[in-house]
Amino acid sequence: MASNEAAREVARNEGLADRIRFEPADWKRLAYPDGNFDCVIGSGVLGRLGTESQRKSAVHELCRVLKPGGTLILHENSDLSVLRQFLTDESLVPSLSETSLPFGLGGGIVSARRPS
């Protein structure tokens, strides 16, 4: 089952299907206005991009659509210290802790909040 389909099924089972959307998107230019979302969640966004410049551009675009006071949550298998620096460069405040995934899945989750 594709990850978007699995996520939709979980949302339905939890009674959230009418309040949440899962959409694949082009990281180069998301089809949403600035400051559109309270929360943006990405998984494996940076690991699929070839250069540091592309990764930084992707983080910039995810931050662009985030509302003031909003939260960005990213799961990555890449170097989380580089991700934290990208978030700081975007004036987001990264969380002080990172969350490791259970069962030896690798990578970690970093969250950051855009100041209000």
Image: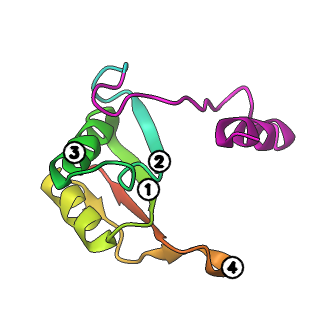
Q: Residue at x 34, y 54 (%)?
A: 113
Indicate which disc, 2 or 4, sits on the residue closer to the N terminus. Answer: 2
Q: Residue at x 38, y 56 (%)?
A: 47
Q: Are marks 2 and 1 in contact (CB under 8 Å)?
A: yes
Q: Using a 10 Å C-alpha cutoff, classify the residue at mark 3 as few (fewer than 14 neighbours), some (14 to 19) or many (20 or more).
A: some
Seen in the picture, residue 86 relative to 65 is either above or below; the reply is: below
Query: Which is nearer the N-term, disc 3 or disc 2?
Result: 2
Q: Could you tell me the amino acid type at mark 3?
A: Gln
Residue 42's mark? 2
Q: CA distance from mark 3 to mark 2?
A: 15 Å
Amino acid at circle 2: Gly
Quadrant of image for the N terminus: top right
Q: Nearer the viewer, mark 2 or mark 4?
A: 4
Name the amino acid type tagged 4. Phe
Q: Secondary structure at mark 4?
A: helix
- The residue beneath circle 4 is 103
Q: Is residue 115 visible?
A: no
Residue name at image x 33 percent, y 40 percent: 62
Crowd rating for badge 2 (residues with CA inside 10 Å; few <14, some 14–19, many 20+) = some
Q: Which mark is residue 74?
A: 1
Task: Name the residue tied to disc 3.
Answer: 54
Residue placed most toward the observer, 40 or 31: 31
50 displayed left or right of 110: left
Mark 4 → mark 1, Cα distance in angstroms: 19 Å
Q: How is the image coloured?
A: rainbow
